[in-house]
Image: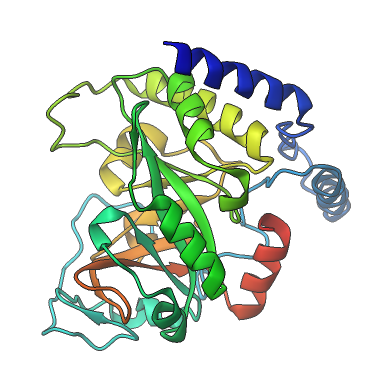
Amino acid sequence: MLFRQTASALFVKNVAMSGCGTRSRPARSDMTTGAGRRISALLAAGLLALSGCSSSSLEADLQPIGNSKRPAATSAAPNVAKLPAPGNGRYGDRKPVDFGKRHPDRYPVHGIDVSKWQGDIDWAEVRKAGIAFAFMKATEGGDHTDSRFESYWRGARAAGIAHAPYHFYYFCRPAREQAAWFIANVPRQSVQMPPVLDVEWNHASKTCTSRPDPHTVREEMKVWMEIVGRHYGKRPIIYTPVDFHRENLDGHFKDHQFWLRSVAAHPQDIYPDHPWSFWQYTGTGMMNGIKGDTDINAFAGNKQQWREWLKKYAR
């Protein structure tokens, strides 16, 4: 109990000292003229310049490459064509699939996400393999930390790989407690890219089978992201798989960046008309410097857009 009170007190102090957290207002729907759109864009740019937080979605300049036309939503499952390992992509895959024309290799910037289950990582080898960014598990719920987090973020930083921590949300604990736990265990210097809130149903959990209604899910997410965003001066990224997204998030959090899981088809086939910044395209990837399966991700833009993204959202 004393630890929680101390963590909460530190959090309140840090929030009071932070000038971040104000969200930019969305453009008015009646600004349909060219002049109106230009004014709206200028106002949005001005707000971004004045704010230390990351802000709106990446619709303007970081849409998925070649995604000018998007298919209508469909409930049909993608036709998954499996390939023999290690596949025909940039990196090997123990269980590769054929993505067709929308293969993740169309995107030049790739990264990984890791937790303690990856064991020892040779970050220099990972860097040589062309990996540009890494998400790493830091905390879960309100009483669990990943034992490899500190060594991972320090190793990634030493290798020159952009990095960010993520929190695995636990639906049987208040969001405020989880935010305080994250802040107590994640130093600011480890948050190079914006922190990530990982929201998904945990089918394997032995201690929490609760599935709150969508409104409650979204309200608790807002609490966590507001607290954490204020503390670190960066608006959190949302990670989610398709089932959780469809049940709880579709049409919401349009002012946040998304990291979407889609391991059998391109995100535009699975999350129609939904902007995204990062695409987790495999959970069985093969990577130099890491033993065993590795999650691999693509950034939704070219190398120049990646440099611009880092300049805007990372430090």
The reply, left or right, for residue 26 in relation to residue 7 is right
Q: Residue at x 62, y 71 (%)?
A: 306
Q: Nearer the viewer, residue 25 or 157?
A: 157
Q: Nearer the viewer, residue 251 or 209?
A: 209
Residue 274 appears in the picture as rendered: no
> x, y percentage for residue 310?
66, 64
Q: Residue at x 85, y 54 (%)?
A: 38
Q: Is residue 32 above or below residue 220?
A: below
Q: Nearer the viewer, residue 237 or 62?
A: 237
Quadrant housing the N terminus: top left
Q: Residue at x 38, y 76 (%)?
A: 104
Q: Is residue 66 above or below residue 220?
A: below
Colour scheme: rainbow
The reply, left or right, for residue 218 in relation to residue 40 is left
> x, y percentage for residue 156?
49, 67
Q: Residue at x 67, y 60 (%)?
A: 60
The reply, left or right, for residue 121 in relation to residue 79 is right
Q: Is residue 133 above or below residue 51?
A: below
> x, y percentage for residue 307?
67, 72
Quadrant housing the C terminus: bottom right
Task: Report the number of numbered marks.
Answer: 0
Residue 296 appears in the picture as rendered: yes
Q: Give the residue furthest to the front.
A: 2
